[in-house]
Amino acid sequence: MANFFKVTPKKQQVGQEVNVNITRLDFNGCGVGQYHKKPIFIEGTLVGETVSVKVIEQKNKYGRGKLVEVLSPSDNRAEAKCQHFLKCGGCDLQHIKPSAQLDFKQQKITELFARNGYAQALPWQEPIVSEPWHYRRKARIGVQYDKAGQVTVGFRQRGSNQLINIKNCAVLVEPLNKIFVPLKKLLTKLSGNNAIGHIEVISTDKITVVVRQLEKLTSEDEQHWQIFSDNYSCEILIDKGKTVTPLFVHSLAPLTYDLDDNINIKFSSEHFIQVNHDVNKQMIAQALSWLNLNKQDSVLDLFCGLGNFSLPIAKKVAQVIGIEGVDQMVIKAQENAQLNGLTNCQFYQADLNSNWQSESWSEKKYTKLLLDPARAGAYQALEQLINFNIPTVLYVSCDPATLAKDSQLLLAHGYRIEKISLMDMFSQTKHIETMVLFVK
């Protein structure tokens, strides 16, 4: 008896073009509609739109589609500025007007707090914003070589480890946004495939290019980099893994950035800095205002980094103690205090996600606390800080999920949320920075 292959309905659906009404955005800003009584996720779509979609994946509980055409656009739709949008993994929200991006991010935070049991209306303040384009002053550019020795220079493709060739990037500051094509042209002249791992570009009062060099540079390679340095007025640093050194003798000036109140921050290429300089300055000003600092205050600054918050705070209070996990950043923070003539701040190294109750700085009394943790949040640190009974806590967050979780701990121990605001550090992307003021 002959057996005939029967195509399952699921396989029949993949590849079809269908019309879908978008009813919501998920937490990543991806549009969601219904297809065959299951949610279908379509990047680049907005709530209220009817779109033509090619079905590219069908699972038991959901599907995915690729946008073919927007049949009825939302009033919040914007024309994407970048030719690489939806291919490059860097930006997610270029198709949304900036004001609507803020609405989406604020709603996301509200929903996360509600999921963690916060039933009241959040006391939202005006968001901190900057120009939505050409704001990013630091970026890591990927470099990949194929088997034929052809080089790709750019960022990762969406949902992939493979790079996409980038010609320009509209979120990078001038002139970093146009550095990709000259870099690729240069790399094709250098000897040795796979000689470079990645390239980092930094814009301060000068342009710095940091090259992760995996093989020794030849004299011809150095000449090519010299020409590039002269043509684009940039300094070249060579990162060999354990050391970062200038390629040319004249590249000895330190990297610095300025803050208000005549504060200058010195840093090294491997150090973390806030990439949106304008938002960073506004963020610090708001932190100083919300903390309502006075000359009697003793402030604890956790995850203090280079002293980005500590040094401006030090000008207004009796004492600041900054704690950071990375030894080299602690050293640099202390140097920055000395550079700015500040004698009322001390910096210590500690793993804040471990037990630090025996540290000398933990025995001091503090009137105010500021913390600016990485995406993993500060739950373990807060569990210990609860016993300090500090009346005012300012939490600067780069991840709304860990912020919502950590907030529950503070709320359960007698704190309330007095103020909260978005900080649009990364316009055009789904990433969210938030500032929350807790008081007892």
Image (cartoon, rainbow, N blue to C red):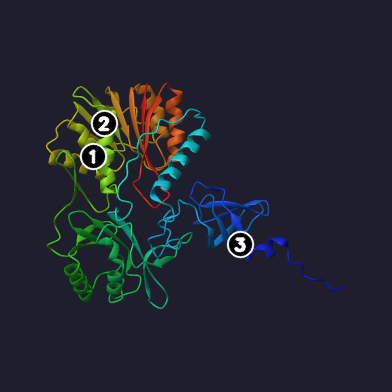
Tell me the distance, in whole angstroms, between the alpha carbons under discs 3 and 1: 50 Å
Give residue 65's position: percent from left, percent from top. Answer: 57, 59
Quarter of the image where the N terminus is located: bottom right
Residue under circle 2? 289
Give the residue displayed 24% in from the left and 31% down from the top. 321
Residue under circle 1? 307
Q: State the SS at label 2.
A: helix
Which label number is shown at residue 55? 3
Quarter of the image where the C terminus is located: top left
- Residue type at the position of mark 1: Gly
- Residue type at the position of mark 3: Val
Tell me the distance, in whole angstroms, between the alpha carbons under discs 2 and 3: 51 Å
Determine whether 90 is above or below 408 in the image.
below
Q: State the SS at label 1.
A: loop
Q: 220 or 18: nearer the eye? A: 18
Determine whether 421 is above or below 153 in the image.
above
